[in-house]
Image: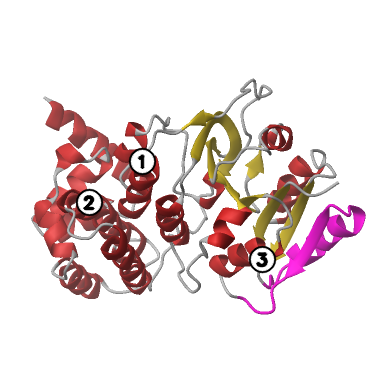
Amino acid sequence: MSVQLSIGTAVYNLEESFLRAHIDGLRGQLTDETELLLIDDCSTNNSAEVCKEYADADSRIRYIRMEENGGLSSVRNRTIAEAQGKWIFFADGDDLFSEHFVETALRFQEAQEDIIIHERLKFLEQKQEEQPCTVTALTPVKEGAGRELSISCMCLDPSYGTRCGLSSRAFYHAAWGALYRKEFLVKNNLLFPVGQKKAQDAVFNTEAYFHAERIAYLPYIMYYYRGNPQGITRRYSADLPQIYEALLKLLLADKQAFYPDDAQVDASFRNHRIMAIVIDNMRLNIFHKDNPLSKEQRKKDFLAFIEQEPYRSAIESFDPKASDRWEWLLTVKLLQKKNFSLLNLFAGNDILFNKLSGAYKRLKKR
């Protein structure tokens, strides 16, 4: 029996309990039509031994160790190259699958779509109780949706997805937010940007949805994303400006190639993607509690950053009515006033950030 579904799990120095939970949650679901690829990006802890243990015990599980540490994009691209199935699913080794993931995916193995978007939920310690999927037919996404979803991934603007009839639980920006037909990926030479340390999925999916001719929606929770307080989305990153500069070059190249001279896309890109980069640099770099620089140096870095283009223009032209990110409102207002002191007080503190942002939102609504 041929493989229909290949699941490629990215592994790098994972906590053993998370990795085992990830594999155990899927192993019992595997069939002769499915394979699990555990692709190790040269872990230096015991992740390799854990993966080998499972691969040695089950022929449907393959352990693949990268020749050198190349980052998540290299792992994802290796998944595409190694996958034997008609469908590919990209997973992260600390997340969990639905208990009905495989049977649900195989139910639609004969689908001719290029991409099948599904739903996901975030969890902290335990995922919610589940019910089997009762969906018997995929929901075709409207004609022209590929363009809108591509723009959404590029601009980080969720309104495009809403217009396509997707719920907020359909997180199509992430690689694990959909099933991809391998033939479609290979035909269009769709690969993840090697060397990009953040938002690789945004670049990949900007291009994937642009090229997709047939997209369907599966309104069922297939994947559970672990909210890890120590994860990369919370850690201090001294090189964040350089990482995001590289990301902007990639996305701007796609914007120019796919949507040149589109004023609406330009505005969305400034208001969402560029502002997201600004906010991240405030919270994960300049004002992060682990930033070792002096207050005086951080203030210099702050003023230099917000005066750079395209950040300066995005801050000055920010339109709160066009954004659903209410937690940005106070931060943007303080950025516009160049108020380092107040931002230094709360921007790097998650609890205070959420409290003050929520209070500011309520005040603005009065």
| Closer to us: 180 or 57 | 180
Q: Is residue 67 shown in magenta?
A: yes
* Residue 42: x %, y % from top left: 68, 73
Q: Is residue 228 left or right of residue 48?
A: left
What whole-number distance in Å separates the C-alpha atoms at marks 2 and 1? 15 Å
Image: magenta residue range: 42-69
Labels 3, 1: front one: 1
* Residue 64: x %, y % from top left: 75, 67
Kind of element beneath mark 2: helix
Q: Quadrant of residue 249?
A: bottom left
Labels 2, 1: front one: 1
- Vertical position of residue 364 compared to residue 171: above or below: above
Residue type beneath disc 1: Gly
Q: Residue under label 3, please give it.
A: 81
Q: Residue under label 2, please give it.
A: 265
* Residue 52: x %, y % from top left: 83, 62
What whole-number distance in Å separates the C-alpha atoms at marks 2 and 3? 33 Å
Determine the residue positioned at 30% across, 52% down: 155
Q: Which of marks 2 and 3 is nearer the N terminus?
A: 3
Kind of element beneath mark 1: loop
Q: Residue under label 1, please give it.
A: 144
Kind of element beneath mark 3: helix
